[in-house]
Amino acid sequence: MELKERIILSSATLDDVEFIVDIKTSTSLRPYEDLTSSDKEAVRKNVVERIKSDWYKQYIIKFNDTERTAIGELHIHWYVKERESWEVGYCIFPEYREQGYCVEAAKIALKYAFEDWNAHKVVAMCNEFNIASSKVLERIGMVREGVFREELPWQGKWVNQFFYCILDSDYREMKL
């Protein structure tokens, strides 16, 4: 008996722009980031450009049921195209955190990257204080490869950023 996935990644469309803009400009949804812009018009323009691009994949994380309730967003994009590397990022609404949904969404993104787009590597970065995100990345098989010292401005000071990676060979080993 095959188990049904609890969540799906739904490709964002232009109808989703305002939803994504609200997430990307929300300090309460992204407490470990000092947002670079609260200018919703600039963010909106950026979101539209990315949705229309072939290098940036924007998804809405939804329950895999009849209602398709949105519970967050996930994006994956070229990190260094010549090296076949992608970068993944995500945001889950607070009421759905610590229930495994982010891990499931990130695993789907890895599947796309390695099985559909022939990625060699997927990377992710997070604020050193974002313990939940570090746990998600480690649960999906990513390895903390480094620390960018005082890389992020956050809450009036410079903090470290953790750098994570998973290679296509790591992914293949995990799938066995």
Image: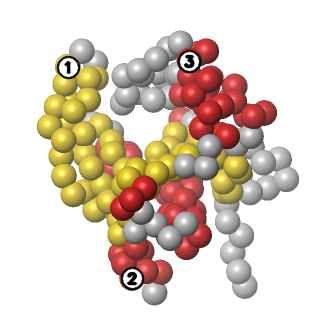
Label 1 crowd (10 A; few <14 / some 14-19 / many >=20): few
The residues tagged by marks 2 and 3 sit, at their Cα atoms, a distance apart of 42 Å
The residues tagged by marks 1 and 2 sit, at their Cα atoms, a distance apart of 40 Å
* Picture coordinates of residue 45, whole percent (x, y): 62, 23
- Disc number lying in front (2 or 3): 3
Instruction: Give the SS element for disc 2.
Output: helix
- Left or right of residue 130: residue 90: right
Quick one: quadrant of the C terminus?
A: bottom left
Examine the rendered structure and indicate whether residue 87 appears above or below residue 35.
below
Instruction: Give the SS element for disc 3.
Output: helix
Task: Depth check: give the residue in front, 115 or 108.
Answer: 115
Examine the rendered structure and indicate whether residue 67 appears above or below residue 100.
above
Res. 170 visible in picture: yes
Amino acid type at circle 2 is: Glu
Q: Looking at the image, which residue is at 47% across and 21% down?
A: 27
* Picture coordinates of residue 91, whole percent (x, y): 52, 40
Quick one: quadrant of the N terminus?
A: bottom right
Amino acid type at circle 1 is: Lys
* Picture coordinates of residue 102, whole percent (x, y): 52, 51
Q: Which of marks 3 and 1 is nearer the N terminus?
A: 3
- Disc number lying in front (3 or 1): 3
* Picture coordinates of residue 57, whole percent (x, y): 59, 49
Q: Earlier in the sequence, mark 1 or mark 2?
A: 1
Q: Looking at the image, which residue is at 50% across and 70% down?
A: 118
Residue bearing the label numbered 2: 173
Residue 42: which disc?
3
Residue bearing the label numbered 1: 157
Amino acid type at circle 3 is: Ala
The residues tagged by marks 3 and 1 sit, at their Cα atoms, a distance apart of 25 Å
